[in-house]
Image: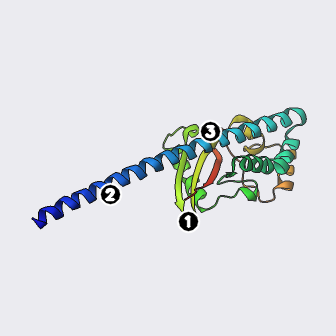
Amino acid sequence: MFYIFYLMERKKLILKILLLVFVVSSSMAEDISAYEKNSIFVIKELSHKLKTTVKSVMQKSGAIEAIEYCNIAALDLTEEVAIDSALVLKRTSLKYRNNHNAPDNWELSVLKRFEKRKSDGEDINLITESAIIDSPEKIFRYMKAIPTGKPCLTCHGAEIKSNIVAKINELYPYDKAKNFKVGDIRGAFSVIIPIEN
């Protein structure tokens, strides 16, 4: 009789554990979805602001002034959007121009996977990755690939005008962000959101 009671109690315990795992998994999936939505929103906001401003400066003053704008204002604009959203936001790349945009270890591994996914035929516009990381504090991380468009080639292509190259070399002596082609992965937006326990 004791053995039957033991088996019944054990089944109840297993069912409780399974239910708890299901509830926690569902809750985590909802949290991840909310974090992803927030990340996508912030990335769209920053992307729009950067494209609009750089395009405007290019049209009014030319590429040299656009490079100077990017050098002075792009990081500030990124930080402004991040602060307004209470998260960490940056642009990074395997071939970065500004040392502040160098990838950390997680970003580096994701960027390499992005390149593999692109070479496997995945649409660059849809390449993203997210994770919850527990080191040292629990954080949500999200990255979205940035495709190289034709306008990018003025300053990031293989055939950059000599006066533009001179300005890039002046402002970014360790520049790696050249020789891109339309359709390459220019880099990625990277978001970090602290997770409250």
Q: Nearer the viewer, mark 2 or mark 3?
A: 2
Q: Mark 3 points at which residue?
A: 183
Q: Name the residue under label 1.
A: 135
Number of other residues with Cα within 10 Å of mark 1, as a class: few under 14, some 14 to 19, many 20 or more: few
Please state, as top left, top right, bottom left or bottom right, where the C terminus lies in the image.
bottom right
Residue 163 is situated, as x and y percent measured from the top left of the image, at: 87, 46
Residue 35 visible (yes or no): yes
> What SS does tag 1 mark?
loop
For the residues labelled 1 and 2, the Cα–Cα distance comes to 26 Å
Q: Name the residue under label 2.
A: 17
Q: Which amino acid does label 3 sit on?
A: Gly
Nearer to me, 109 or 192: 192
For the residues labelled 2 and 3, the Cα–Cα distance comes to 48 Å
Residue 174 is situated, as x and y percent measured from the top left of the image, at: 77, 59
Q: Nearer the viewer, mark 1 or mark 2?
A: 2
Q: Which amino acid does label 2 sit on?
A: Ile
Question: On the rendered structure, is 195 left or right of 152?
Answer: left
Q: Which of marks 3 and 1 is in front?
A: 1
Q: Which residue is drawn at 57% across and 47% down?
A: 35
Q: Which amino acid does label 1 sit on?
A: Ser
Q: Which residue is drawn at 55% across and 42% down?
A: 127
The answer to which of marks 2 and 3 sits earlier in the sequence is 2
Pointer 1 and pointer 2: residues touching (CB < 8 Å)? Answer: no
Q: Residue at x 64, y 54 (%)?
A: 94
> What SS does tag 2 mark?
helix
Residue 38 is situated, as x and y percent measured from the top left of the image, at: 61, 43
The answer to which of marks 1 and 2 sits earlier in the sequence is 2
| Quadrant of the rendered image containing residue 181 | top right
> What SS does tag 3 mark?
loop
